[in-house]
Amino acid sequence: MDSSFIIGLAGIAVLIILIAIRVPIAYSMLIVGISGVTILSGPAVILSQLKDLVYAQFSIYDLSVVPMFILMGSLATFAGLSRDLFQAANAWLGRFRGGVAMSTIVACAGFGSVCGSSLATASTMGKVALPELKRLKYSPALATGTVAAGGTLGILIPPSIVLVIYAIIVEANIATMFMAALVPGLLAVGLFILTISIYVLIVPEAGPPAEKIGFTETKKATLAVLPVLCIFGIVIGGIYVGAFNPTPAAAIGAFLIGLYGVIRKKISWNNLIEALLETAKTSGMIYLILIGAETLKIFMSRGRVPMEAAELMISSGLSPYMILVLLLIALIILGCFMDSLSMIILAIPFFWPVISELNFGMPEDSVKIWFGIIALIVVELGLITPPVGLNVFVIKSLSGDIPISETFKGVMPFFLMELVRVTLIILFPAIVLALPEFLSG
Amino acid sequence: MGLVNYTRQLIRLWALLGGFILIGIILMTAYSATSNLLLNAPVAGDFEIVEMGVALAVFCFLPFCQLERANVSVDIFTMNAGPKSEVLMSILASTIAVLFASLLLWRMSLGMTDYREYEEYTAILSIPIWIAFPPILFSLFLLILASLITTAESFRKLLRLKVEGKLKKPDFK
């Protein structure tokens, strides 16, 4: 171990301290990255890179989908998507025992796919679903647990911003990642619905059925979400069949959602301004973190930290799957404290070099896709892990009188089901890899 | 006080300008992709406009992002921190933002000089790269102002806490 490696490790320690005392993650990375490179190689290197580094990063073509999808998501919020989705799902599923909880899951998946933030999905859907669940006398544990768990669904269902960021970090194809994420994402919806069915089988009074909704009502509710579903069909289908790249797809999606909202008179001028400012905040935050990650990467690679850590891991004599599980546990723990996007940007540059050196009996490109999907699921799992999961706290602030221990109790079955899903994907990589292989022929 | 409010308004409007640039890029890209699909005639060099336009838009967003304190931080370890340490932490964060924004403004203005001296153009549309820089530098200038405003806000809070602390002391005796 040479001194630059030790300086690199010290840098990580300082980074953790800064993040822990509430310095924004982006600035923590920037300050450690810039001063780290200065210590290792003198000020000239980083000073000359800063002349162009930020513009070069901001003008990466693939990244341009990020602000476009964010704008699409905030426009969709104003278009009343959360309520429409919930009502449509409810019209079909509400009549069954536990059905309103199942509808919440379906609506969360639909809303989360556009929204891209678990916390925002949990809070938006919570506002719509919790009053209804309460009215029908669902048990507080099941009601709040469902919304907290449902919030985590969006990350995989395309279009997902975190998925785009992962693809850019490991240099994977964005369209391929979108294809790979679909089956695991839908699997989660299925498994969560199964969880609810088992739950109400054991505790029938936890999820009483809602009153039946007539045919005309059902038709109306379903028709209301149809245009939006079509728009997503065009965006995602267009990417899948190769009609357009992710950036044009995002542009078309944002345009169509905006048009839909204006035609239905749901998006006013003030809504548009608000959506733009929301996009400004979220995009600015993400791009700043990416710059932080870039300076940190320059520092870390000069200190050879990812390489040395990878060598250390590989020479430890653990089997590839043991190392994978260790890294995943680390991600779950870190995911409890940080939002998934920051987590992915921070951890993947360290974890991917380790994983890419291991032999899982697949080509490296497949491992890239497979590991990405698993990592994304696991990071989201942190959001519902007792005793700190952030999603649970969001629900707490919405539901007021329901104690947080109840929510954690309700989240536990979903948490266990997520472990089942991760295990399935680790054992059968085909769940992830089959669709991209099929679509790209 | 009036000046600060004007600056706030300016930062907000600047972010909105970035937003409208983004909308322009979206419309152009959507048109280009559709025209490519149907008529096999995309807008020439559309990706160059996307790259430069989105970069410009994001730079416009940064000051607003700072002003609204939208940069994510982790507060789970300091949830039980007292109001005073909370304010001190936020002063630290804002100061770092001032330093970073100033450093970047200095370096990127030199970056613009480089681009002007070596005359770099985009490949298809031959747009000189340096023309993106003046609005970017202005964004960074606004970012400095935004971070100064958030720093001042935190200091004012600190002062208020001190005053309240002094007033409260007799109660404890």
Image: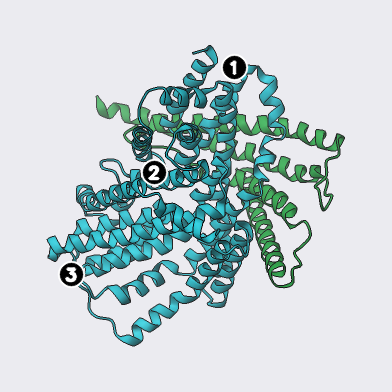
Q: Residues within 10 Å of mark 2 (few under 14, many from 20)?
A: many
Residue A135 seen anywhere in this rendered image of the structure? yes
Closer to the camera in the image, A112 or B56:
A112
Q: CA distance from mark 3 to mark 2?
A: 32 Å
Instruction: Give percent across and percent down for residue A50.
Output: 68, 31
Q: Give yes or no for contact between labels 1 and 2 (Cβ–Cβ under 8 Å).
A: no
For marks 1 and 3, the one nearer the N-term is: 1
Q: Colour of chain A?
A: cyan
In the picture shown, does residue A194 fall above or below A358?
Answer: below
Report the chain shown in green: B
Closer to the camera in the image, A437 or A247:
A437
Question: Which residue lies under the disc numbered 1?
Answer: A39
In the picture shown, does residue A371 fall above or below A143?
Answer: above
Q: Residues within 10 Å of mark 1 (few under 14, many from 20)?
A: few
Instruction: Give percent across and percent down for residue A202.
Output: 13, 60
Residue B9 seen anywhere in this rendered image of the structure? no
Residue A199 appears in which quarter of the rendering?
Answer: bottom left
Question: Which residue lies under the disc numbered 2?
Answer: A379
Describe the element under mark 2 as helix, strand or loop: helix
Instruction: Give percent across and percent down for residue B118.
Output: 86, 35
Residue at 66 percent of width and 46 percent of height: A60
For disc 3, the chain is A
For disc 2, the chain is A
Describe the element under mark 3 as helix, strand or loop: loop
B48 with respect to A236 (left or right): right
Describe the element under mark 1 as helix, strand or loop: helix
For disc 1, the chain is A
